[in-house]
Image (tube, rainbow, N blue to C red):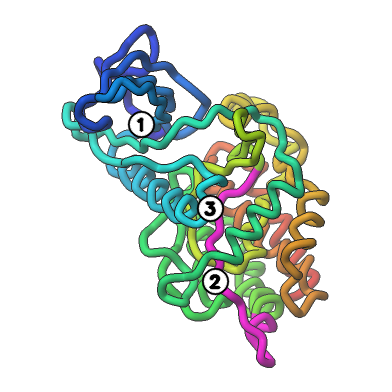
Amino acid sequence: MNYGGAEGLELGGGSNKVDPSVLAEGCRVVSTECHGVSFWANAGRIDVELADGIPKVFFIKVLSKEVGKNMVHGEFESMKAIHSLLPDFAPKPIAWGTYQTIPDTHFFLCEFRDMIDDMPDPQKFTVRLAKLHQKSSSPTGKFGFHMTTYSGNLPQMTEWEESWETFFAKSMRWALTLELQAKGHNPEFDVLVPILFDKVIPRLLRPLESEGRSVKPSLVHGDLWYANSGVDVDADAPLIFDACCFYAHNECKLFCHATLANIPADIRHLFEDEFGQWRPVCNRFGAEYLDAYRSYVQISPPEEDYDGRLDLYKLRFNTHVSALFKESQALREQMLGDLRDLANRYG
């Protein structure tokens, strides 16, 4: 967890104290309470009365140290990018910054949207996701993002690149570097990693940008799995949050898949506390969501490589997840299984 506490300013417990850097002058805090569960941050709800007497509710995340500062900044910029395109698809980000009274403590503030954790309707959800991908336009015309964003508490590679293959290869190599730092070397990497970069990635991604074909850099959420989505109670409409955006091939981050059936019992509670009840496949965005999305957005040619590309993109996601949770050798084995499979099929 990237939260070291905020003495005197903890949320809930009858407290109505908030650091003066968080809210606009004239706001009167009515109450605070813990809200939601985060593995990385302290999260809560702040009910206020504005200077004109109008009630307002905010959602806040609080994190500590330099990594926490970078995380809330990246989330703010990511949510701002999504909200500017589709304001009905994401809570409006309000501010990010550093506590005046506790300088090593940082916050992300957005509007509060009352949500239920039911799965959103596939058609309603994917039509908005398709609009996000189609309406977005990279400010440089390249793949990447204007700053580093964090998936969990680890940074992603977001440096601008003209080629999707080049960008993905750098992103994949960075995820592997983080995973090796977390869990150490495995002799299989000496064989499998060269095959991945010399054969698998060129085989699956180079055709996207060959023979007159091209890939549009689309704004992607960055960590789109079911726990980062919800249904707005008032509007009965899907929402996404906890974004770590970059501009990518739209298929890259359609839905993040990680199989977690064999998480060791001694750390399984960490996942359950953070993400709710884990299933054998953690992402409930199943085939009906992919099918619904494809009714709005065509598969990128060559279509025959589609399944292989999704498996390659899944490898990058699972590698990052393995780096996040150092205790779990099951996550490394899952990642190695993905790597072996791709090497067998395309190496």
Q: Secondary structure at mark 2?
A: loop
Residue 223 shown in magenta = yes
Q: Total number of numbered labels? A: 3
Question: Looking at the picture, how far across and down is residue 60, in whole percent?
Answer: 39, 30
Residue underneath mark 2: 217
Most extreme residue toward the bottom is: 211
325 on left or right of 4? right
Residue 223 in sight: yes
Residue drawn 42% across and 32% down?
Answer: 41
Amino acid found under the numbered disc labelled 3:
Leu
Residue underneath mark 1: 62
- The circle on residue 86 is 3
Q: Which residues are magenta?
A: 206-225
Q: Secondary structure at mark 3?
A: loop
- The circle on residue 150 is none
- Which comes sooner in the sequence, label 1 or label 2? 1
Q: How busy is the neighbourhood of tag 3: few (under 14 within 10 Å), some, or many (20 plus)? A: some
Question: Looking at the picture, how far across and down is residue 101, in whole percent?
Answer: 17, 27
232 on left or right of 257? left
Q: Are marks 1 and 2 in contact (CB under 8 Å)?
A: no
Q: Secondary structure at mark 1?
A: strand
